[in-house]
Image (tube, helix red, strand yellow):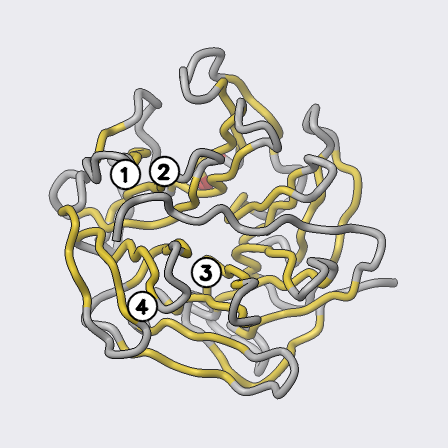
Amino acid sequence: MIMFEPINDTISLLGECPIWCDRTNQLFWTDIPGCQLRALDPISGDVRHWSLSEPLGSFALTADKNVLLMGLASGLGYYNLTNGHFTKIAASPGVASTRINDGRCDRMGNFVFSTMSAGDVVQPIGRFHRLNAATLETETLDLPEVTIANSICFSLDGSTMYYADSMQGCIFCCDYPSLQNQRLFAKIDGPGAPDGSCIDEEGFLWNAEWGGSRVVRYTQDGKIDRIIKSSCVQMTCPVFAGPSYETLYCTSAKVGLDTPTDIDGALMKSEILAYTGLPEVKFAGRL
């Protein structure tokens, strides 16, 4: 049976947003409450750390391999990996007491991201937004308010956007960029809640389940195709990485667990040679 296994002893309170950089051959991810960006060299096993001034919810690659577009709690901007300098582009469009959470570039290179309640008691005040790559202006998408906005990803041709409210236990989708035809894609079957997602080369959606100890592959019509189990209870976001995009990694979290194990919060890995991922779309905005 194929399962996830931890790759090292690096633990995150809340690991999220794993992204493979095909130019530096590194796997980046964030520890949101730990205010750290991390990067794994799969060959050596070394992990680099960048300390940040506030929580990093999500980020994207750019045209410069040494610059990331970051969605920090309070705003968006460019972060230089070489000197640690952050150039702010825009404040978070979320209402008061929210922070930037999940995010990913659409197929046109715009950064689509979410905001959610930053308090200890989450409230249904989360929204989905977009940073326009051409204008560097933000807009709030005409989608319903949610409690914990997650699972942002796009179909192969970019015509469908997937998104979730973890508290509802549902993954939704809509036509994109029109946002019309908003509909249920999949309802989680089991104790888990939908967290981050990615799309593979066949257009199937992989979703990590918070509290479900698994990552699930869904067909394009929302039916379960494959389940990969994990010893971590709180799986957070999957990604295909490596030069051929054939290795499935997934971040996890230990925050909120009464008795976390030694691997809760670890970066997890599963060798699944039958499936292949896609290169991450880079933010197309000017630097």
Q: Nearer the viewer, mark 4 or mark 3?
A: 3
Identified by mark 3, the residue type is Glu
- Closer to the chain start, of discs 4 and 3, is 3
Mark 1 vs 4: CB contact within 8 A? no
Q: How far apart are marks 2 and 4 (CA)?
A: 26 Å
Identified by mark 4, the residue type is Pro
Report the side of 122 relative to 44 (left or right). Answer: left
Q: Residues within 10 Å of mark 4 (few under 14, many from 20)?
A: some
- Farthest residue toward the top? 181
Residue for badge 1: 131
Q: Tag 4, which secondary structure?
A: loop
Q: Horizontal and vertical percent for residue 62?
A: 38, 55
Mark 3 vs 2: CB contact within 8 A? no
Residue for badge 3: 16
**Is 44 rendered above or below residue 134?**
below
Q: Residue 138 is drawn in which quadrant?
A: top left
Residue for badge 4: 33
Q: Distance between the residues labelled 2 and 1?
A: 6 Å
Q: Residue 94 is drawn in which quadrant?
A: top left
Q: Which residue is drawn at 48% across and 66% down?
A: 253
